[in-house]
Structure formats: C-alpha cells, structure tokens
Amino acid sequence: MFSLKQLQAIYWISKLGTYSAAAKKLHISESTISKRINEIESLVGVDLLDRQARHSRLTRDGLNLAIVAEKIIVLCDDYMEQLNRSEALVHRYRIGVTELVGLTWLPQLLADLKGHYPEVTFEPEIDVSTALVDKLLAGGLDLIVVPLVMQDPEVTSRPLQKMKLEWMSSPTLFKGRDHVSLKDLMRYPILTQNGRSGVDAVCDTWLKSAGVSGKKLFAGNSLMTLASLTVSGLGISYLPKLYFSDLVENGTLKIITTEQPIPDIQYNIVVHSEASSTSFDQSIIRMCEDLCDFSKQS
C-alpha cells in the first residue's frame, strides 16, 4: 500500500521536474525523495523514473501513477479542510466577555466569525470576570476574554493586550488639581462594580500593597453607570483610559494622577485545555488577537 508521503514525492517530481525542486517543495532532502520513489518501485515492480534521462523524467507508469497521486492528494486536502471546519459544526460556540470587550471589539469579532464560519451559531455572553470563569469551568462557555490569569489545568490561557486604567473624577472635585497623593485620593468614595470584577481584584491588591484603603461604593455591574456616577461627582473611579478618552477631552471627566500609577490590566483569552489545540479554537484565538482594541469604536 502506498503512503501519502510516497505519492506526494511522485506527484511533485511530475510537476516540478527535478528531485531538488520536489524536495524543496516538501521541505525534505533529495535523498528522502529518492528513497520514497524507490519504495514505490519496489511495491509495484516497475520503474517510475527514466534514469537514463538528464532530468527526472517519469516513465509511462510513473506518469500514470502521478495522475492517480494527484487525485488522492486533492481528496486528502479536501478532507482536511472539511475536518478543520467540522470541529464546531456539531454545537454552538459560546463566547463570554467583560462589558469593556462588549463595548469595543466584540461586535467586529462576531461579524468576522460569522463570515468565516457561517454554519456556526456564535452566542456571546457579557458578565463580570469571576462569573465568566465559573461558567467556563462548568462547561457553560467555550471561550472567555477576562482580565484574570487562571492557574487551572482544565483551561489554557493566552495573553491579549494590556488595558490602561486611570483615576477619573468629575472636574468639580479636587478644586482644579490634576495630581493628588493616594492618601488624599482615598478620602473620596471609590465607585466600583459589585466586587466580582477581575479589574477590581487587581486594583484591590495594588491598593493594599501601596498601604492605602478607601471606602467603596458599589455601583452595579455596568461600566457606563459607573462612569455616569463618576461624572455626577458621587465619587472617584478607575476607568479604562482609551474608552473614556473622549469624555476626558471634552471636559466631562478628569484624569487624576498620583505618585503611583495604577498597574496595567492584562486581558487573557481562556479556553478549555482539551480544545485549545484544535484548528477551530486556534482560528478564533487569532481573530481575538488581531481585533483586540479597547478604544471606543466609531
């Protein structure tokens, strides 16, 4: 029985005319090409190459086998393409993201995915990071994009971009000052989400390491509500710099700097480990990497 590698050798010699060209195409040595041709000749009992000719000219038997080899190679290529695309055909694909991703690059991701895989139903879900993690581990989601690093053998993480946070307030606070100490900043209520946000977890750890703490006011799970309450002067908050840059530029919000900047927030793609190596999941991960952008979409 012929192997696919043997058939590829005879096919590419027929197409390119020389051992060296065929070897280069297949990323193997000329000696390997020669070995594979010899193996086929031993199987069929006839010469496939006219070794009296200056170039690698196929005999009539060699040409006939090359025609058969081409058909088999095309069928194999078609099958692999179908296999790659069929990995997700048996079920829908559920993507969980935080609100910031939903407000920025999720719509374009879904549009691109639908164009690339029209037969797949993609279901987005927006929630806080810890809730998304719980749903992923429970099998309720296939992929999540969160500002958390997970150390669980059941999942595989890949870093995306980092997100820049800034302390922001109403322009009416701080009597026109743009720079205050962290200690002074903590005199104002800190508007945060409901305590299950990955961003809040990172900032809580950072504030603790800086030796300061403030009074929190929970403002629900909506980033837009958080920004609106900050604009009203109810308190201060740490908000995504890129997304709210327009409100800073028009004077609706003001950035407050301190002696220690807020650490950048690393966003990650997290998938089930058993699916992380499939071509389908890898394709989605690459799309996420290409599209990740935390600025406000026009």
Image (cartoon, rainbow, N blue to C red):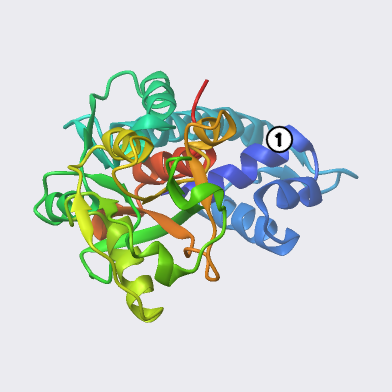
| Circle 1 residue | 14
Q: Left or right: where does residue 196 sit relative to residue 17?
A: left
Near-viewer residue (140 or 6): 140
In the image, residue 87 lies at what x, y percent? 27, 38
Near-viewer residue (172 or 101): 172
- Taking the view exactly as shown, the residue that stands out farthest to the front is 175
Q: Quadrant of residue 55?
A: top right
- Taking the view exactly as shown, the residue that stands out farthest to the left is 138
Q: In percent of the image, x 22 and y 47: which residue is there?
A: 128
Near-viewer residue (222 or 256): 256
- Taking the view exactly as shown, the residue that stands out farthest to the right is 54
SS label for mark 1: helix
Q: Left or right: where does residue 178 sit relative to residue 15?
A: left
Q: Quadrant of residue 141?
A: top left
Q: In percent of the image, x 45 and y 41: which residue is there?
A: 172
Q: In percent of the image, x 34 and y 41: which residue is there?
A: 233
In the image, residue 144 lies at what x, y percent? 28, 47
At label 1, counting other C-alpha atoms closer than 10 Å, the crowd grade (few under 14, some 14-19, many 20 or more) is: many
Q: In percent of the image, x 80 and y 51: which residue is there?
A: 20
Q: Is residue 119 above or below residue 9?
A: above
Q: Count of labels shown?
A: 1
Q: Left or right: where does residue 46 sit relative to residue 169?
A: right
In the image, residue 134 lies at what x, y percent? 13, 55
Q: Left or right: where does residue 153 sit relative to residue 158?
A: left
* Amino acid carrying mark 1 in the image: Ser
Q: Is residue 44 visible?
A: no
In the image, residue 263 lies at what x, y percent? 48, 65
Q: Is residue 205 visible?
A: yes
